[in-house]
Structures are given as C-alpha cells and as structure tokens.
Image (spheres, grey):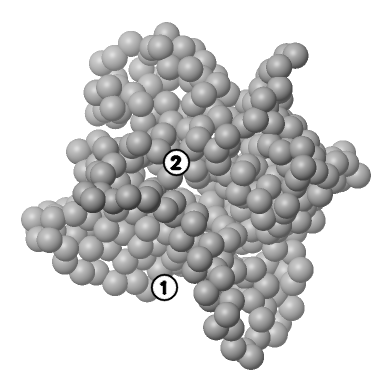
Amino acid sequence: MKDEEQTREGQQQEVPGSVSLRSEFDFIAYIRGRAAQAESPSPSVIAGIGDDAAVIPQNSGNETVITSDLLVEEIDFLRQTTTPKSLGHKSLGISLSDIAAMGARPRWALTSIGVPLEIWNSSFVDEFYEGFLALADKYGVALIGGDVSRTPDKIVIDSIVVGECASNRAVCRSNAKPGDRLFVTGTLGGASSGLRLIERGARLENVGRADDSQLLHELLLRHLAPEPRVGWGLVLGQEQLATAMIDLSDGLSSDLTHLCRESNVGALVYSDRIPVDPSVSELCGRRALDPLMLALHGGEDFELLFTASPSQVAKLPKRVDGIGITEIGEIKSAQEGIRLCEGQRVWDLKPEGWRHF
C-alpha cells in the first residue's frame, strides 16, 4: 500500500549489515522454480504459485480454489487504529478477494490467530470473530477450522479460504492477449487515502465530530473493512467473460505488472479513464494528496482488474451488486511495455505499489 520505504501502517525497518535486499517477488519466483523441480506424479495443479489462488482438479467436474493470507501487527495493521471487528472482517475479506479474482465461489474458511496474553484476556478475540463471521455469513462461507496460539507481543493472523468453480472456469493471471481490453471494478484510491488520513490522526470513533464526516467515514472503511468483489468474480468466471484477472491488493501499477508478467504482455493505461474514488478527489485533493497517484499506486482497494477479449466486451454487465466497471486501457505486446497515457504524453508505468521487502 505504501511506497517501498514504508510498511502499510508503520515504518519498515532496515536490516543491519544488509548489502542487497531481494523483493518478495524475487523470493516467490525462487520458490516457484524450486517447487516445480520437486513435482511428484500426483494429479497436476491447474494453477499454483504466482496466481491469486491455487487451483486443484476434482473428480466431480469442479475445481478447488485455495488461497492463504497473513496479517501481521505493525506491518499490515495497527491495533490502535482499527477495531477487532474490522480486523476480523478484513482478514477474511482479503482472502475472499483472492477467490473472486479466480472467478470462483468461496465456500469454506479456516483462520488461525496468535495473540499476546493481555489480548487473550480481553474481549478482542471474541469481537474479531464477530467481524469475521458476519462477513462469512454475508457470502455463505462456513468457518471449518483454524488454530489459536500465544505470541510474545504482536497479533498474527492467518486466513485460508477454499472455493470452487466449474472445470476450466478458473480465471488465471496468465491468459491476457494483445488486443484484450483492460477493466477495473469500482473505484480506486479509497483505501490508500483512508490510510493516509489515519496516519494524520483520523479515527472512526471521532468521525462524527469532524468536518466532511461522511467522506471520512467512507474512506476509513475502505481501508479498515474492504468489501471483496465476490459477485463480479463469479460473473466473470462462470460466464467466461474475463481472459485474465487479479485483485488490486498491492496497487494498480504493481498488480497490472504482475498480470502482464504472467501473461507475457504489455499494457497501455489511459490516466483520464482511471476511476478515482470521488471521496478521494473531494477530500484528499484539499489535503495535498494526489488522487491519481493514490489510485495508481495505493493498494488494498481489493477491486478486480481484468481483461476481456473485444468480442466479449458487449456481454459484460454494467453493474453487479451495485458496483460498476470502467475500461481503463488495453493489452499490448510485451515489447511495448506497460505504459501510461496522459493527453499527448506517454511514459512507462513503473510498479510503485506495496512491497513487503
């Protein structure tokens, strides 16, 4: 969500004596290659490391889709700026978003949480599960397991969601083709601006006493309790309308780079088509925050970025669950790179979204 010098809600610590720091994506690429070398003759994985979720074939004509997400206190959230219910909601929501990005239906969830003793002896964990289960109920997801443990001083949460889709209906990141149109659901920049406002002292409990209270409330919730686009994921997957898809967790610039790398393509994005959250434009523009930069590089909007072939564009619904889509560009050849067009100017769009390392 933040630029690479910072964590999402705290400063990233430098590693003493480090000479060259590899990114998490370098490490993922290494593990992906190492895992491929160790493949056994068991049933093949349809999609594995490098996508939003793994896809495993079943014998019933369906495919199982599995994702896992980790939230660590002072890296992914701050205890003093969120509520236990919001944290429970978000921990499930980010995994539901991964399942949606595969065009699948979420079915089951497992969550594990490690907390310090003083948190265990409070109502925090009970309220955390209230938020988690409220979102699970909304999308018909059953909590079927997990674990609870004690940590020295920080909260750690692991969320696993298992979903299903019909055979050959999973939407991977790797099938975009030159000529495909590029779309995004909803609006962008809301979660990132919500984080910036939190860093400047805004809190949900104080919103009622502030100017622009409704706008503040909306932006804070975009960051603290994001809504996954489960409905859009199902429509795009079941009706085979998307050729490739990814959820916007790291930011448009970074997640578009991930999709293009997996598909071995380039892209051209038109800046004036990017659907900046209206609250961002109205509120953050007056606080010296650039709405376009927040939409391009801010993460955790958990909207869906997808490609569609020209022949399928007319079949795309205008809205699903009240959420619309916007065509923001097109897929190009890999040789053309990933570029941003603003009027007569065209330049390379570098991935400047969230990085853990």
Quadrant of the frame with the N terminus = top left
Q: Label 2: how many residues lie within 10 Å, few (<14), some (14-19) or many (20+)?
A: many
175 displayed left or right of 55: right
Q: Which residue sits at x=60%, y=49%?
A: 258
Q: Are marks 1 and 2 in contact (CB under 8 Å)?
A: no
Q: Amino acid at mark 1?
A: Ile
The number of numbered discs placed on residues in the rendered structure image is 2
Q: Which mark is residue 354?
A: 2
Q: Which residue sits at x=77%, y=42%?
A: 335
Q: Farthest residue toward the top?
A: 286
Q: Label 1: how many residues lie within 10 Å, few (<14), some (14-19) or many (20+)?
A: few
Residue 288 in the image: state x and y as whole percent: 40, 12
Q: Which residue is mark 1?
A: 144
Q: Is residue 141 above or below residue 213?
A: below
Q: Is residue 250 visible in this depiction of the protein?
A: yes
Residue 123 in the image: state x and y as whole percent: 16, 53
Residue 83 in the image: state x and y as whole percent: 26, 42
In the depicted view, which residue is nearer to us: 224 or 317?
A: 224
